[in-house]
Amino acid sequence: MNNPSKRRAFLQGCALAMGSSLVPRLHQKATARDSLDHDRSQRFSVSTYSFWQFRGPKVPIETCIDQASRMNFDGLEILEMQMTDSSNSYIQQLKRRAHSQGLALCGFSTHQGFVSPDSTRRQDNIKKTIASIEQAYRLGIPTMRINTGRWGTIKSFDALMANSGIEPRLEGYTNDDAYKWVIQSIEECLPVAEKCGVVLGLENHWGLGRTAAGVLKIIGAIKSP
């Protein structure tokens, strides 16, 4: 092809053909990427409790972080009782480990009990809950689960579960007494939760939170966003 004008026209035609063939591919890639981004709006997390060993030693939080990352979870909720230390160095180590694997620490599961006529016992649990809120803050966790507690008249947890989480009240007291204790105790924790930016979520398991009506009764009585 010695004619320069013909050679130039041929090359231009090839370029147009190649460009037109790339358009569908680029569109397909963009569509796939958009679809992936859309799918990622649905993110999934797992609790360290999911890796709990009922027999044998507790699974370290570090191991749970690694396993959650390998299973491609987006976030991890930490069960406080699985933590082996509450020092700042340990907490920063957990944060760093999760961050390095692209895993968000999204929840903190704690245990406390406010269903008691003993004001000293309730105050101890308030202090424990406040310490947990501050620990969630240091971990960078925005939400924390709390419990109402229970009457404790059934000593065996297995027996409690066999009875669907229902237990008799302490003699001489009513459920209204228990609701008052729980509501007042949670209210005492709220200023610290607000200061730390930690949202408290009420467990719906045993105790006064066993039913939806019980949970709503407590939430409705507490004036907090």
Image (cartoon, grey):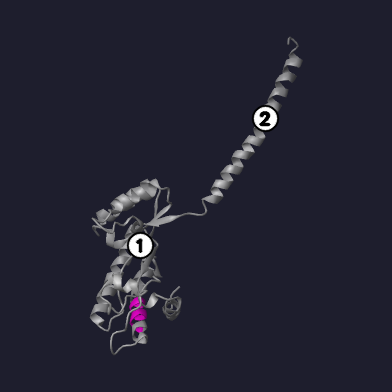
Specify the amino acid type for callout 2: Gly
Instruction: Please report the residue visible at 37 percent of the width from the left and 60 percent of the height from the top.
Output: 141
Frontmost residue, 185 versus 110: 110
Magenta stretch: give its range. Answer: 180-187
Q: Percent position (x, y) of residue 91?
A: 29, 55
Instruction: Please report the residue visible at 39 percent of the width from the left and 50 percent of the height from the top.
Output: 103
Crowd tier of the residue under label 1, counting other residues whose Cα lies within 10 Å: few below 14, some 14–19, many 20 or above: many
Instruction: Kindly check if marks 2 and 1 are in contact, taking CB atoms under 8 A apart as contact.
Output: no
Image quarter of residue 25: top right
Q: From the image, which quarter does the N terminus lie in?
A: top right
Instruction: Please report the residue visible at 31 percent of the width from the left and 84 percent of the height from the top.
Output: 169
Q: Is residue 218 visible?
A: yes
* SS assignment at label 1: strand
Frontmost residue, 48 versus 155: 155
Image quarter of residue 57: bottom left
Specify the amino acid type for callout 1: Phe
Q: Percent position (x, y) of residue 27?
A: 64, 39
Frontmost residue, 17 versus 209: 209
Q: Percent position (x, y) of residue 178?
A: 34, 83
Image quarter of residue 156: bottom left
Tell me the distance, in whole angstroms, between the alpha carbons under discs 2 and 1.
53 Å
Assign the magenta stretch its main secondary structure. Answer: helix
Q: Which mark is residue 108?
A: 1
Q: From the image, which quarter does the C terminus lie in?
A: bottom left
Q: Percent position (x, y) of residue 151?
A: 30, 79
Q: Is residue 112 visible?
A: no
> Magenta includes 182?
yes
